[in-house]
């Protein structure tokens, strides 16, 4: 099989001097900082420079007379244990030594109210603090659409609420999730515990592009505005109809569902409305990122996987994450073949060499490969250019040798 290497001209806007931007944004809010303990949230996503942002937020709070500490806030991720969630944030470079702040990890929560689908909780350390600074990236959600999706509100509702609030949120039908997020978020804002938010936008190359400090009373409005800005950066696939999509690596570091459903055009939610594009007949996933620590949520979005991906799955972590969301389809193990070479060979028997695309993951889409028949469509896209000569698909030890 010969493939053409494609380069997508994604939006590049890397942010310089991140600590200065954090200080400037927080100063702009002109808020009264408590002279006591303030919690800073830390999630499980591989956000660009997240350790630098977290440290800068802590340094700013110290300068204002507060005593900041870090709280891992990630719902049911990494086994839904205090030890597992602490290990996750430490794997992102957020350690006590590097941050100069204590990490307090617990799955214990305090009830703060109720909504239609159940009770709403807050991490005990966040609830006991004089205030909480919420940090998160703004982006499209993988299960629903709405004015507010994945960002500060989601961190407050699901992250800070640990597994209990995560269950309340996911117990709402997907068509009502956008409303449930707002209902639960308003309860948390009404608690008076949220000091400020730091909303992060990444560019098309997954690099830090913008940081916006937000006052709690403006959070709903500002997050909706920032989600629209995120759409300007969000990368997608350059064609909308293909036979085979080969995803080199999936995992929590690339998307909350392992593979971003907004990229692959498939949400994998039984009985719920799905996305219309792109239309892909077969999705193959070849590996699980090491940073996912065995959590293979979203593996069920693939139709076929390799043995090395299957062997990397931590079944307990994956089960807990999927069970909390209530979408067990996403945790089902697909047909498993020995390695890349066997998998691709089998799919070629069915589809030949027509309408294939290879991507590194669903987050980094600046470089990809396509079969020759897709080239005319690709070159109609003003964002794309192709290398002049094709690259033969080769294997070593059963693994493909494409360079992304």
Image (cartoon, helix red, strand yellow):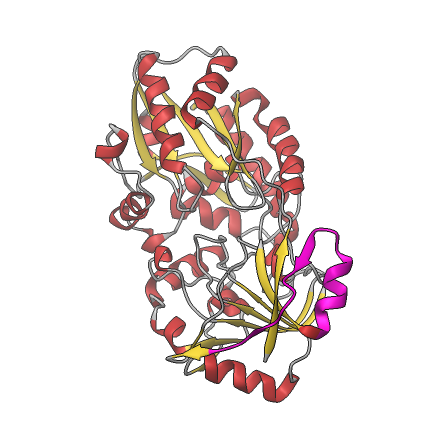
- Does the rendering let one see residue 61? yes
**Residue at the image point whose x is 41% and y is 80% from the top:** 398
Looking at the image, is 125 positioned above or below residue 233?
A: above
Check residue 234 for magenta coloring. no
Quadrant in which the N terminus appears: bottom right
Task: Residue at 43% x, 18% y: name it.
Answer: 23
Instruction: Pinpoint residue 41: horizontal percent, then vertical percent.
Output: 38, 34
Q: Nearer the viewer, residue 322 or 24?
A: 24
Residue 304 x %, y %: 51, 77
Above or below, 36 against 72 in this view is above
Q: Is residue 380 magenta?
A: yes
Give the residues in magenta.
373-394
Which of the 4 image quarters holds residue 380? bottom right
How many marks do you count on the picture? 0
Q: Please, which residue is most extreme toward the left here? A: 97
Depth order, front residue of 177/195: 195
Vertically, is 120 above or below 187? below
Is any atom of residue 192 visible in this view?
no
Q: Identify the residue at horizontal 60%, vertical 77% (top origin).
A: 2
């Amino acid at each position: 099989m010969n493939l053409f290497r494609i380069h997508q001209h994604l939006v590049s806007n890397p942010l310089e001097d991140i600590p200065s931007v954090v200080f400037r944004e927080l100063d702009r809010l002109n808020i009264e900082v408590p002279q006591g303990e303030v919690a800073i949230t830390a999630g499980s996503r591989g956000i660009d420079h997240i350790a630098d942002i977290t440290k800068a937020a802590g340094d700013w709070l110290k300068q204002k007379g507060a005593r900041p500490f870090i709280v891992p806030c990630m719902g049911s991720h990494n086994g839904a244990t205090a030890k597992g969630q602490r290990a996750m944030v430490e794997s992102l470079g957020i350690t006590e030594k590097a941050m100069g702040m204590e990490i307090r990890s617990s799955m214990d929560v305090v009830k703060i109210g109720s909504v239609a689908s159940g009770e709403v909780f807050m991490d005990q350390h966040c609830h006991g603090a004089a205030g909480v600074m919420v940090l998160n990236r703004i982006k499209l959600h993988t299960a629903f659409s709405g004015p507010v999706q994945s960002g500060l509100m989601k961190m407050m509702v699901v992250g800070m609420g640990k597994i209990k609030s995560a269950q309340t949120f996911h117990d709402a039908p997907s068509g009502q999730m956008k409303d449930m997020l707002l209902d639960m978020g308003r309860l948390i804002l009404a608690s008076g515990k949220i000091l400020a938010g730091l909303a992060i936008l990444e560019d098309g190359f997954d690099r830090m592009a913008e940081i916006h400090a937000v006052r709690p009373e403006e959070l709903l409005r500002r997050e909706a505005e920032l989600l629209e800005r995120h759409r300007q950066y969000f990368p997608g696939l350059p064609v909308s109809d293909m036979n085979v999509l080969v995803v080199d690596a999936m995992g929590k570091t690339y998307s909350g569902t392992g593979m971003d459903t907004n990229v692959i055009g498939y949400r994998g939610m039984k009985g719920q409305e799905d996305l219309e594009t792109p239309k892909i007949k077969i999705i193959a996933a070849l590996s699980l990122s090491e940073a996912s620590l065995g959590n293979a949520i979203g593996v069920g979005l693939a139709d076929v996987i390799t043995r090395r991906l299957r062997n990397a799955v931590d079944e307990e972590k994956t089960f807990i994450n999927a069970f909390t969301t209530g979408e067990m389809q996403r945790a089902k193990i697909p047909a498993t073949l020995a390695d890349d070479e066997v998998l691709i060979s089998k799919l070629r028997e069915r589809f030949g060499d027509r309408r294939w695309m290879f991507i590194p993951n669903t987050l980094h889409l600046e470089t990809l490969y396509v079969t020759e028949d897709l080239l005319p469509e690709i070159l109609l896209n003003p964002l794309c250019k192709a290398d002049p000569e094709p690259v033969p698909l080769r294997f070593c030890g059963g693994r493909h040798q494409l360079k992304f």
